[in-house]
Image (cartoon, rainbow, N blue to C red):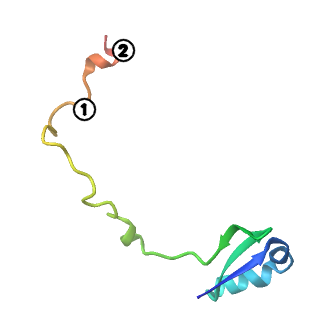
């Protein structure tokens, strides 16, 4: 895939044509203003939802004092229960 820099004024003048090239997957555009990149325009990566589900699996750990049967909070900590 080709990465190409394009000025904001050129992008505005040829937006439709440039977006067609992006849509085809032929190019990723770096839109610049005064030589500095202000946006990157590219076709989105279409990942199956199955790859996103479970992405954080096995990344959290519980300390040894965790009790799954203990209350989630101490009732005395809540003003409405006083």
Q: Quadrant of the N terminus?
A: bottom right
Instruction: Point out residue 66 in the picture as x, y percentages from the top left corner.
Output: 16, 39
Residue 32 appears left or right of 73: right
Q: CA distance from mark 2 to mark 1?
A: 16 Å
Q: Quadrant of residue 8?
A: bottom right
Asked if residue 20 is positioned above or below residue 82 in the image, the reply reads below
- The residue shown at (66%, 71%) is 40
Nearest the viewer among 36 and 7 is 36
Instruction: Point out residue 55 in the picture as x, y percentages from the top left corner.
Output: 34, 64
Query: Is disc 1 placed on a helix, strand or loop?
Result: loop
Nearest the viewer among 30 and 53 is 30
Query: Is disc 2 placed on a helix, strand or loop?
Result: helix
Q: Quadrant of residue 36?
A: bottom right
Mark 2 or mark 1: which comes first in sequence?
A: 1
Residue under numbered circle 2:
79
Pointer 2 and pointer 1: residues touching (CB < 8 Å)?
Answer: no
Asked if residue 78 is positioned above or below residue 49 in the image, the reply reads above
- The residue shown at (24%, 59%) is 58
Question: Is the residue marked by circle 1 packed among few (<14), some (14-19), or many (20+) residues within 10 Å?
Answer: few
Mark linked to residue 72: 1
- The residue shown at (36%, 15%) is 80
Question: Is the residue marked by circle 2 packed among few (<14), some (14-19), or many (20+) residues within 10 Å?
Answer: few
Instruction: Point out residue 4 in the picture as x, y percentages from the top left corner.
Output: 69, 83
Residue 72 appears left or right of 27: left
């Amino acid at each position: 895939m080709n990465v190409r820099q394009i000025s904001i004024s050129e992008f505005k003048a040829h937006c439709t044509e440039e977006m067609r090239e992006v849509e085809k997957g032929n190019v990723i555009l770096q839109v610049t203003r005064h030589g500095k990149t202000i946006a990157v325009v590219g076709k989105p990566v279409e990942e199956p939802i199955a790859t996103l589900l479970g992405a954080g699996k096995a990344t959290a750990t519980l300390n040894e004092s965790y009790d799954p049967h203990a209350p989630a909070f101490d009732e005395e900590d809540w003003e409405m229960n006083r």
